[in-house]
Image: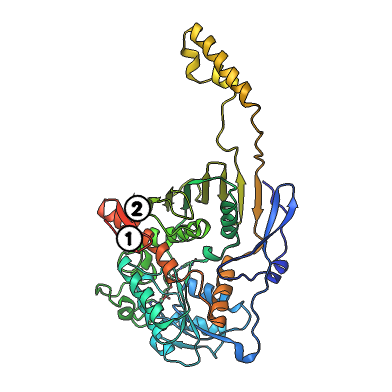
Amino acid sequence: MSKPDQPSRRSFLKSAAVASAAPAVATTKLSQNVYALNRDQEPARPAGPNDRIRIATIGMGIIGFIDTDTALKVPGVELVAVSDLYEGRRVHAKEVYGDKVETFLDYREILARKDVDAVLVCVPDHWHAQISIDAMKAGKAVYCEKPMVRIVDEGPQVIDVQKQTGAVFQVGSQYASSLLYDKVKDLIKKGAIGEINTVEARYNRNSDTGAWQYSIPTDASPETVDWDRFLGTAPKLPFDPVRFFRWRNYWDYGTAVAGDLFVHLLTGIHHATGSLGPNRIAGMGGLRYWKDGRDVYDVIMGLLDYPQTDVHPGFTLSLQTNFADGGGGDTYFRFVGSEGVINVSFTSLTVSGPGIQTATADQVLKGYNSVRTFSNAQQKAFAEKFLAEEAAKGKPKPRASTPEKFVVPNGYDERFDHFVNFFNSVRDKKPVYEDAVFGYRAAAPALLCNDSYRQGRVIGWDPANLKVTS
Ligand SMILES: NC(=O)c1ccc[n+]([C@@H]2O[C@H](COP(=O)([O-])OP(=O)(O)OC[C@H]3O[C@@H](n4cnc5c(N)ncnc54)[C@H](O)[C@@H]3O)[C@@H](O)[C@H]2O)c1
């Protein structure tokens, strides 16, 4: 399929900002039934040199560099320090951001600095809660990468410290600020697909790096890596570069696929539907292909039931990640309602659907239906009654079912929008949209998929009161 013309990056940047809680989405017609999505606000600009936000990044691995680069694109943001446990990454931070950026092994030295306003927490999952809590207590604003916590029990601690300190705290799951999911939200709200009844979301991969076999540097050793600090409260083990550089593959540090990827899917779904979360959660899967020493699974499916609330009808969610999808990997969302479906990819969404059909008279009387099995006399009697009733009802209204497609601008990056939201909150001391409670409501069901998989049972969750119920 050919790609429609898309607006330029420049026009996107011009209108790239977004208000935290009520994102404004504009659309521009590109061609018949194809529209471009856009923001209609400018990013907040610094008032002057004293209005700069000074950040430090804790954890300069893959996402540490990506998040820092993205944060620095927001006007008025400056990097002053980084912390990392591998020497090569501290060296590379200076190579990329210059010698004036100070580097530290111990993140607490960053928290002690007066010239740091906000920290980006980009460390492995087993450090998220501790570093976020320490940072909020030290008076810093915190952008904590997803999932907010590694285990369900840590969530209330982070929420409590955020409340006590009043810190600006945002979880780094960028679908919460995405133009696409803002549009899905609009469409669902205005009834474009009728009553939502199921959501399917899939995030499949078919590569070694996609399955977390990240490269290990040739100089990895106890001299270049602070192994004990990495372990933190995890079980003590001798130095193992595979565990350090591929920590996602081990339950001691990561949250497996559900914590890594389902949490993105749940963030998009909760944002689009306004839901607080499911009340029944089941996870099933296994280690099917990547038998490289990892102790986590590589295939998982989650089934989550969302009870009816004031903002949405009851719906059932199926989630899937397969790291050995020989079909080529695939990522999509399908929001299914009684009137249609919204299909979402990384860069576009399509809303379509004929809705629920009523069979034509021909289909009822002669098609795949029970009438054909009745006696001839009964078929005649049935047809007379049926046709008389149909005539009394009048002609059914034709349904408009031409699919409509909405595309994001070329180069659109929801991570940038997410940082704009974060820094707007830091500047204005306004609540963030993806706060600790939202972050926990996305993380907990993902982590409970893991618990369900490991315990072999369906788990009950109370999304309003944030409690495991069974
Ligand atoms: N939002 C997203 O799209 C997205 C994408 C990728 C990763 N992430 C999240 O970001 C986090 C990091 O993932 P990654 O892929 O960058 O991992 P990574 O292994 O590439 O980097 C982690 C870095 O943290 C450092 N580190 C570990 N413990 C530390 C500590 N106590 N103090 C300071 N530094 C420490 C390590 O030395 C390492 O360089 C994960 O929680 C992951 O889920 C989010």
State the separation of the CA atoms marked 1 and 2.
Answer: 25 Å
Quadrant of the image occupied by residue 238:
bottom left
Q: Is residue 101 visible?
A: yes
Please, what secondary structure does the residue beneath circle 1 have? loop
Q: Using a 10 Å C-alpha cutoff, classify the residue at mark 2 as few (fewer than 14 neighbours), some (14 to 19) or many (20 or more).
A: many
Q: Is residue 215 visible?
A: no
Instruction: Find residue 346 and name its label.
Output: none
Image x and y of residue 271, in percent: 51, 60
Using residue 427 as the reference point, say whether residue 223 is left or right of it: left
Please, what secondary structure does the residue beneath circle 2 have? strand
Q: Nearer the viewer, mark 1 or mark 2?
A: 2
Q: Amino acid at mark 1?
A: Arg
Residue found 50% across the figure and 14% down from its top: 372
- Which residue occupies the foreground of this view, 276 or 57? 276
> Which residue has dot 2 on it?
281
Question: Is residue 80 positioned above or below 385 on the image?
Answer: below
Residue found 25% across the figure and 72% down from its top: 235
Of all residues, the one furthest to the top in this rendering is: 377
Question: Is residue 395 positioned above or below 95 on the image?
Answer: above
Image x and y of residue 444, in percent: 37, 62
